[in-house]
Amino acid sequence: MARGEQRAAARLAAVQALYQMEVTNKGLNEILAEFQAHWIGQEVEGDQYRPAEIAFFQNILQGVLDDQKSIDRMTDDALQAGWPLKRVEAVLRAILRSGAYELMRRGDVPARVVITEYTDLAAAFFDREEVGLVNGVLDGLAHRLRADEFEERRSTPA
């Protein structure tokens, strides 16, 4: 399996794990153990979960938890006024937090890749309106956090 596919599977697992942590109040170590033993690369209720890059999965989870206050503040600022992140549906919140974390701390992953991956992930769970929200919020954060990645493209002659 290609690295990109393993990373996509890691992103999905991270979003699911963040959601699980929020609704069950389980801790990081318990969730990591549960996902590695019972979800990643396993068949669950007839669905085959793809193998994931475990280190990447762990990094996203740990990173979101470590930086959650600043991620939430930034994401609140990027959302429409009067609609704070805490009012967003839990899976959508996990998607936004994971994407924001990668934009903040994973400079090795191009911003456009982060936006596309999490927008595609949102499309697996939600309708067009929510997918557009994820795309808009992450695009806004990317332009703020990684302006250099977008300016280079504009200044390059065609």
Image (spheres, rainbow, N blue to C red):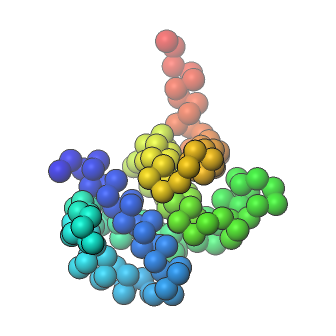
From the top left corner, tell me how far across and down residue 53 is, in percent. Answer: 26, 61
Relative vertical location of residue 32 with respect to residue 61 in this rendering, above or below: below
From the top left corner, tell me how far across and down residue 119 is, in percent. Answer: 50, 47
Q: How many marks?
A: 0
Residue at 39% x, 61% y: name it: 12
Relative vertical location of residue 67 with respect to residue 138 in this rendering, above or below: below
Task: Judge by depth and name the residue closer to the eye, 28 or 86.
Answer: 86
User: Residue lying furthest right in this view?
Assistant: 82
- Tell me, yes or no, if residue 142 can be seen here: no
Residue at 71% x, 54% y: name it: 79
In the rendered structure, the answer to whether residue 123 lies left or right of residue 134 reads left
User: Residue lying furthest top in this view?
Assistant: 158
Residue at 53% x, 54% y: name it: 126
Task: Judge by depth and name the residue closer to the eye, 141 or 130.
Answer: 130
Relative vertical location of residue 128 with respect to residue 32 in this rendering, above or below: above
User: Residue lying furthest front in this view?
Assistant: 46
From the top left corner, tell me how far across and down residue 70 is, in percent. Answer: 64, 67
In the rendered structure, the answer to whether residue 80 lies left or right of residue 96 reads right
In the rendered structure, the answer to whether residue 117 lies left or right of residue 130 reads left
Residue at 42% x, 69% y: name it: 16
